[in-house]
Amino acid sequence: MTDESEQVTERTQAAARAARRARRIGGRSTPDTALQDTGATDTALQDTGVAGTAGATTAASGRESQAATAAVPLRKAAGGEPVPATTATPGTPGAPPAWSGRRAWLPAFVLAIVCLGLLGWGVYDSHGVWWAKSSSSVADERGPVLAAAKSCMAAMNTYDYRKLAESEATGAACTTGTFSGQYKQAFEKLIKPQAAKVQFTQTAQINNAGIESVSGDGQQWVVLVYGQLSTTNSQTGTKAPTLTPFSARVTMQHVGDKWLVANYQYAPTS
């Protein structure tokens, strides 16, 4: 019995050492294989206190395993059941790309650069439209420009065969630049030779005018004018005037303290 007791004691000490090793590495304690090989019964282990030691060891290991599990944060699975959350490192399946946090701002940054570029180009390319100048400057000049365009278009297109020189001088006073020479040439070659022959008269009436565009420096404006021409001549057989609507695109140039006509073209009327 003494030898058997010593063998049981040795097995008990071996089991205790295995349990301590299991607690240190976080695993479950397993009895030494020598206990299984000898076929020692639970009764013998209980008599020597091995069962109590092994049970306590197993219970302690179980509590440590539960505590380790409880320390892991829980997340909701697809079915609604809480499961331990896993922490994936970059490069492992299911982990977010390593650059997702650092470069997520890149698309928005590139879009902002593109928008700024388009805005800058729009401002640069819009120098010829009327709103390129400040609204206060446009408001200050709008009235004088429109008034000059209306009065000059009426003067340049009104003449009487009985006083052609006076009509030409009045119209030429509204012109500037190369257009002055063009106006005088047309009057001398086209209007004067024919007006006296047919006793031609024409009166221009401007009904409406509006701003189409303004140059970047504010010195040149394009104005659209709408009106009608009232004409008479000896070949119509009647003294009643003929009324003809017309429209024109007039370029007004700022010269000194005046707005003069730098060019104009008749536009089709609907």
Image (cartoon, helix red, strand yellow):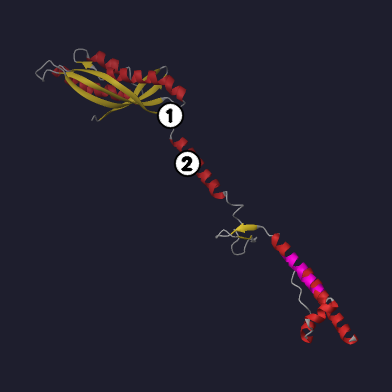
Q: Which mark is residue 18?
A: none
Q: Which residues are magenta?
A: 52-65
The image shows residue 105, relative to residue 12, as above or below, that is: above
Other-residue count near label 1 (Cα within 10 Å), few / some / many at <14 / 14–19 / ≥20? some
Taken as a whole, is the magenta stretch helix, strand or loop?
Answer: helix
Instruction: Residue type at mark 1: give it.
Output: Trp
Which percent across, then down, holds residue 47?
84, 79
Q: In terms of depth relative to the viewer, which is nearer, 135 or 223?
A: 135
Q: CA distance from mark 2 to mark 1?
A: 18 Å
Quickly name the residue at label 1: 131
- Sequence-first tag of 2 and 1: 2
Instruction: Please name the residue shown 31% across and 17% down the image.
Output: 151
Asked if residue 54 lies left or right of residue 191, the reply is right
Q: Looking at the image, which residue sits at the far left?
A: 237
Are the two marked residues, 2 and 1, in contact with CB atoms closer than 8 angstroms? no
Instruction: Residue type at mark 2: give it.
Output: Leu
Q: Secondary structure at mark 2?
A: helix
Q: Is residue 127 magenta?
A: no
Q: Is residue 60 magenta?
A: yes
Q: Quadrant of the image for the C terminus? A: top left
Which percent across, then down, holds residue 150?
31, 19
Q: Name the image quarter holding residue 179.
A: top left
Which percent across, then down, holds residue 143?
38, 18
Q: Secondary structure at mark 1?
A: helix
Asked if residue 226 lies left or right of residue 86, the reply is left
The image shows residue 18, relative to residue 218, as above or below, that is: below
Q: In terms of depth relative to the viewer, which is nearer, 58 or 135?
A: 58
Quickly name the residue at label 2: 118
